[in-house]
Image (cartoon, rainbow, N blue to C red):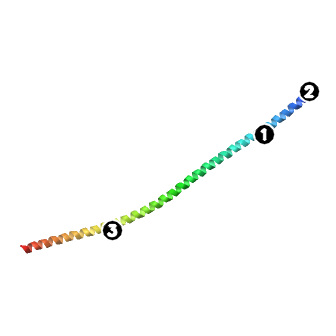
Amino acid sequence: MVSVEVDLRRKLMEANDQLALKTEQLETLRQLARHTTVVEVDHMQINELEAELDRCRDAEQRLAAAEEEHAARAEECDKLRRENAKLKDDLTARSAQVLEARKEVGRTRAETEVELL
């Protein structure tokens, strides 16, 4: 009976040792799982950040293209404004010439009427 009791105690101690070992392995696996989850989350965040960076780069390229187009249009507007100002000046000068020509025609007509009388 004593040998059975010793044998059972030995088996109980072995079982406790196995339980302690398995508990330690389980805790190690839990820590590894937490670390793996963190690494997976970090990779997911890195992927999201890289995608956001790509979107930002695309937006920067679109902005640069828009700024170039804006500069070209602004230059064209300035050119058209200068041309418009020149045309207005030409129109003013021609209007003055026409007015002077009308006055001259009026004088000539008056002189011709006087001569005919």
Quadrant where the image shows the N terminus: top right
Residue under the point 49% across and 59% down: 65
Q: Which mark is residue 25?
A: 1
Report which residue position mark 3 lands on: 86
- What's the amino acid at mark 1? Gln
Q: Which of 85/58 is in front?
A: 58
In terms of sequence position, does the residue under pointer 3 or pointer 1 come before the other? 1
Q: Of discs 3 and 2, which sits in the foreground?
A: 2
In terms of sequence position, does the residue under pointer 3 or pointer 2 come before the other? 2
Circle 3 crowding by C-alpha within 10 Å: few under 14, some 14–19, many from 20: few
Residue under the point 7% across and 73% down: 116
Say which quarter of the image contains residue 5: top right
User: Is disc 1 placed on a helix, strand or loop?
Assistant: helix
User: Is disc 3 placed on a helix, strand or loop?
Assistant: helix
Compared with residue 115, is residue 52 higher up or lower down, i.e. above or below?
above
Quadrant where the image shows the C terminus: bottom left
- What's the amino acid at mark 2? Val
Report which residue position mark 2 lands on: 4
Circle 1 crowding by C-alpha within 10 Å: few under 14, some 14–19, many from 20: few
